Image (cartoon, rainbow, N blue to C red):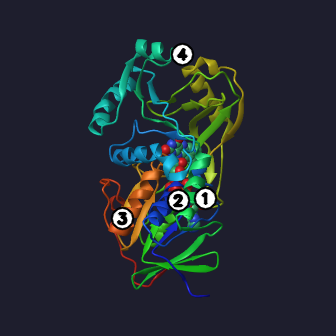
Amino acid sequence: MTAPVEADVLIIGGGGAGCSAALHLARRGARVVLLERGLVGSQASGANYGGVRQQGRHPAELPIARRSHEIWRRLPELLGTGCEFVQTGHLKLARNEAEAAELVAYLDVAASHDLRLEFLDGAALRRRFPWLGPAAIAGSFAPEDGSANPRLLSPALARAARQAGATLLEQAAVTACQHEGGRFVVEAGGRRFRAERLLNTAGFWGGQVAAWFGEAVPVRPHTPNMMVTEPIPYVIEPNVGVAGGNVYLRQIPRGNVIIGGGHGMGDPAVPMSRPLAQVTLQAMRRAAALVPALEGVSVIRSWSGIDGMMPDKIPVVGPSGTTPGLFHAFGFSGHGFQLGPAIGAILCELALDGRTETPLEGLSIRRFLAPRPMPAGAAMT
Ligand SMILES: Cc1cc2nc3c(=O)[nH]c(=O)nc-3n(C[C@H](O)[C@H](O)[C@H](O)COP(=O)(O)OP(=O)(O)OC[C@H]3O[C@@H](n4cnc5c(N)ncnc54)[C@H](O)[C@@H]3O)c2cc1C
């Protein structure tokens, strides 16, 4: 094999997290090479529901969500496209008193992170959103939240990263890594790449990358079931969810309603994922109970995708517990699309400065394991 390609930072995985990291690193002048097994954005980052939501997030990831929100607002100047991000607000509904109490309890969490959130009782809810049915008895509305087009974000980040000088290689699956003499040597597509720092942004497969470095964690595949309807008259302006999360929906201005709820199936080894008809029907029934205008509307497409789910439903973000120079960001547990832009900024700071301004408490990989360092020079495949 020929001499390795030298870089300052190598990135495994070209979803929203990895492409954003490549962009931030290249803008700081680092030599960066991103290696993507398929095409950028071809896994969860391109298949998701498109919810860009801060409301309801675990307090440990709210600082990242707040930082990401600022980047989402600046996407046009950063990327030359806003990726169809619209701040329509996110409306979270309660269908019983226990769920309403959950919404009330979250008001304090939001306030402690300066997240604007307004509680609406049944009467206020129906005045403001007359298209809602009787199933919703209360709601909380986050005006800064909204949605975006998941097909656009990763390719736009990748394009901007390339323009800033990053090398992004597609159809380049990483098959082996070594850490020797303080440097990572990574094999992909019959070539070798070498750098002092390595970013693990491999989505669900980030668990496999972490295991190569003696950090096996209990990540499992998460396959949300998605569908889109035929167009109907545009009335549903906000992104809508429910306490408990078993259904969520948003309407795009041309009329189609995108609905999620329940789980499809998938095999990360292939990788492949697909929706399940019974789950699609059940989500449609739940959606029509919230928005009666959806009764009898045709579903024109359904799909799924694979994300990494951690046992505590929050991602692994931060330095490796075993290997200096390795930084993880994976296992986003079904809600990493909104976080992606900030994750790239954070990984860039960790890789180049050794620290980040964004608190990462509670997200370390160390919460899952007692680290066992790999022997120096050991091969990891
Ligand atoms: C159906 C669905 C709906 C969702 N809805 C939302 C939502 O509304 N809002 C929200 O915030 N989040 C949502 N999510 C979650 C969100 O999509 C993910 O958390 C986020 O996209 C993860 O981004 P990522 O860059 O970490 O991973 P990915 O997008 O999975 O990217 C990882 C990349 O790594 C590559 N890779 C893996 N192994 C290797 C290797 N060995 N060599 C090279 N490359 C490799 C993969 O090919 C992949 O492209 C949803 C997820 C799904 C599946």
Tell me the residue that label 3 is attached to: 350
Alpha-carbon span between mark 2 and mark 3: 16 Å
Decide if ligand 1 comes within 8 Å of the CB at mark 1.
yes
For label 4, the residue is 133
Specify which label sits upstream in the sequence, 3 or 4.
4
Q: Which residue is mark 1?
A: 40
Q: Position of residue 233 (x, y in %)?
A: 66, 21
At 62% from the left and 47% from the top, the residue drawn is 151
Badge 3 marks a residue whose secondary structure is helix
Ligand 1 within 8 Å of disc 2? The answer is yes
- Picture disc at residue 19: 2
User: In which quadrant of the rendered image does the N terminus lie?
Assistant: bottom right
x and y percent of residue 29 in the render? 44, 69
Q: Quadrant of the C terminus?
A: bottom right
Tell me what residue is drawn at x 40 percent, y 36 percent. Answer: 55
Tag shown at residue 336:
none
Q: Is residue 229 above or below residue 151?
A: above
Q: Secondary structure at mark 2?
A: helix
Q: Say whether disc 2 or disc 3 marks the residue closer to the N-terminus.
A: 2
Work out whether mark 2 precedes mark 4 in sequence or the reverse, and give the earlier one: 2
Drawn side of residue 112 relative to residue 244, left or right: left
Could one spot residue 320 in this view of the protein?
no
User: Disc 3 vs disc 4: Cβ atoms closer than 8 Å?
Assistant: no
Badge 4 density bin: few <14, some 14–19, many ≥20, Cα 10 Å = some
The disc labelled 3 sits on which kind of residue? Leu
What residue is shown at x 59% (from left), y 65% (from top)? 36
Distance of label 3 from label 4 (alpha carbons)? 47 Å
Marks 2/1 in contact by CB < 8 Å: the verdict is yes
Residue 72 in the image: state x and y as whole percent: 47, 45
Query: For the residues carrying marks 2 and 4, which lies nearer the camera in this image?
Result: 2
Looking at the picture, tell me which residue is in the foreground, 226 or 230: 230
